[in-house]
Amino acid sequence: MEVEIVVLLWRHHEVPITPPKLSQYALALSSLCQDPRQFHGHDLIGTLQHHEAVHDLEFAYASLAICSAKAHLRKKQIRRLLDIARSANGHNIDTLAMTILALRCIVKDHRHRNIHNSLRSPSVSLAKKQQSDGGFENLYNTALSMLALHDAHDINTLWNKTAAVSFIESKQDPDGAFTDPGLTAEVILALSSKGLGAIRNLDCGKLDTDYENHVDLDGLTKSLQYHGNDSDPRNVTITYTLWVGTNITENYTLAITAPRNSSFYNIMQMAMEADPKFSFEASEWPNGHYVHTLAGYKEEPMGYHYWLLYRLPEVPDALAPPANHMVAPVGTLFL
Ligand SMILES: *[C@@H]1O[C@H](CO)[C@@H](O)[C@H](O)[C@H]1NC(C)=O
Ligand SMILES: *[C@@H]1O[C@H](CO)[C@@H](O)[C@H](O)[C@H]1NC(C)=O
Ligand SMILES: *[C@@H]1O[C@H](CO)[C@@H](O)[C@H](O)[C@H]1NC(C)=O
Ligand SMILES: *[C@@H]1O[C@H](CO)[C@@H](O)[C@H](O)[C@H]1NC(C)=O
Ligand SMILES: *[C@@H]1O[C@H](CO)[C@@H](O)[C@H](O)[C@H]1NC(C)=O
Ligand SMILES: *[C@@H]1O[C@H](CO)[C@@H](O)[C@H](O)[C@H]1NC(C)=O
């Protein structure tokens, strides 16, 4: 995907990148914990901000992408979303659902909490657009509506989620797909509890920079001063657990205190100094360190000897091993 984006950016004078495409890439990068504002020297969010989308749907999609990257929307942009929300009945299902997703993202910013109230009316309008077959017009709109209504617990009774799921399931092709890969991906997002609306909340292990880029939005929201201590402690303590073998034949845990911005490679070095059981060997490559030996075992990909790095909120439990999606998004091989 990165190569694809680079090629598109490179050729954008011949073939302009459309805002929806740019929004889609920005969302994908954000969901991978990469900053679309710093994509190999390109600011995808800045480019997106530069285009004033003509269509409300494109505009709402771009707003969601900007907000999900933790970038700021302009006052004027938030007003436009609120205008769409206010005139909900005059808008198509997809526009409405995307606007709700964008606004739901925006209210996660502490400065915009007070526009939370403006979400109810468009959510009610959207819920009422569910049809007797359980769907919202078509597969795509049904998936998008489910994502938009996912967190709207106060209006749970105004639409029937079970019926929407049944509608989606009835559209599955014999090969398991839903028409095409794009639509299949949307459907999978809708059926899982996490979707487009959850990207901003991803914990990418970085400090929330929201508080630094303060922009005053007088008149629209009252800015709340942040009183946290977050920038204060420069060190963090993490526990590093090493499990060896399919049946966990060796098990070591170590607590390491290190500067907040340390790479995991630094942590591994500190662990090795503290306890030889955590020793490892790595080779250096232009894109990072390749760890080929860990705890005395040399990697043998063909013999299924390899290692995975999981990033977990707590010390892992052998009876409930961490799920595959907890594998760290970056640096399973290169750190
Ligand atoms: C929701 O839809 C399901 C499946 O169509 C149906 O069985 C159920 O009775 C509906 N629930 C309500 C509250 O209407
Ligand atoms: C920061 O945390 C310390 C102790 O954890 C507390 O005493 C202090 O009041 C906090 N400062 C702010 C601005 O909240
Ligand atoms: C792991 O344990 C299971 C059951 O105790 C056993 O059948 C299996 O052979 C073990 N695997 C290895 C790699 O030791
Ligand atoms: C932070 O951790 C480093 C070791 O990684 C230690 O040398 C330093 O004293 C710590 N600083 C604070 C403020 O705890
Ligand atoms: C961490 O931050 C310090 C000070 O801001 C900087 O000197 C250091 O290079 C950073 N380390 C990494 C691994 O980014
Ligand atoms: C690993 O060791 C810790 C304590 O050292 C223990 O609580 C945990 O159950 C062990 N896990 C496994 C899989 O043996």
Image: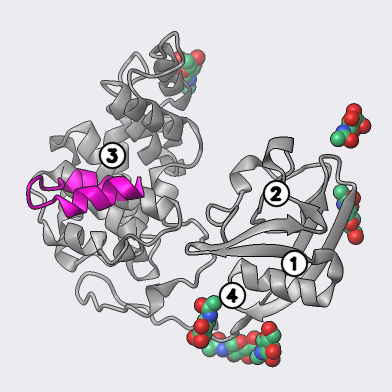
Q: Nearer the viewer, mark 2 or mark 1?
A: 2
Q: Does 2 lie within the magenta span?
A: yes
Q: In the image, residue 32 lies at what x, y percent?
A: 45, 52
Chain part drawn in magenta: 1-25
Q: Local crowd at mark 2 within 10 Å, few (<14), some, or many (≥20)? A: many
Q: In the image, residue 107 lies at what x, y percent?
A: 36, 60
Q: Classify mark 4: helix, strand or loop.
A: loop
Q: In the image, residue 132 lies at what x, y percent?
A: 33, 15
Q: Name the colouring of the figure.
A: one colour
Q: Label 2 to label 3, Cα distance in Å? A: 41 Å
Q: In the image, residue 167 lies at what x, y percent?
A: 40, 16
Determine which residue is flagged by label 3. Answer: 97
Q: Label 4 to label 1, Cα distance in Å? A: 14 Å
Q: Do residues under tags 2 and 3 come within 8 Å of each other at their CB atoms?
A: no
Determine which residue is flagged by label 1. Answer: 239
Label 1 beta carbon within 8 A of ligand 6:
no
Q: Label 2 to label 4, Cα distance in Å? A: 21 Å
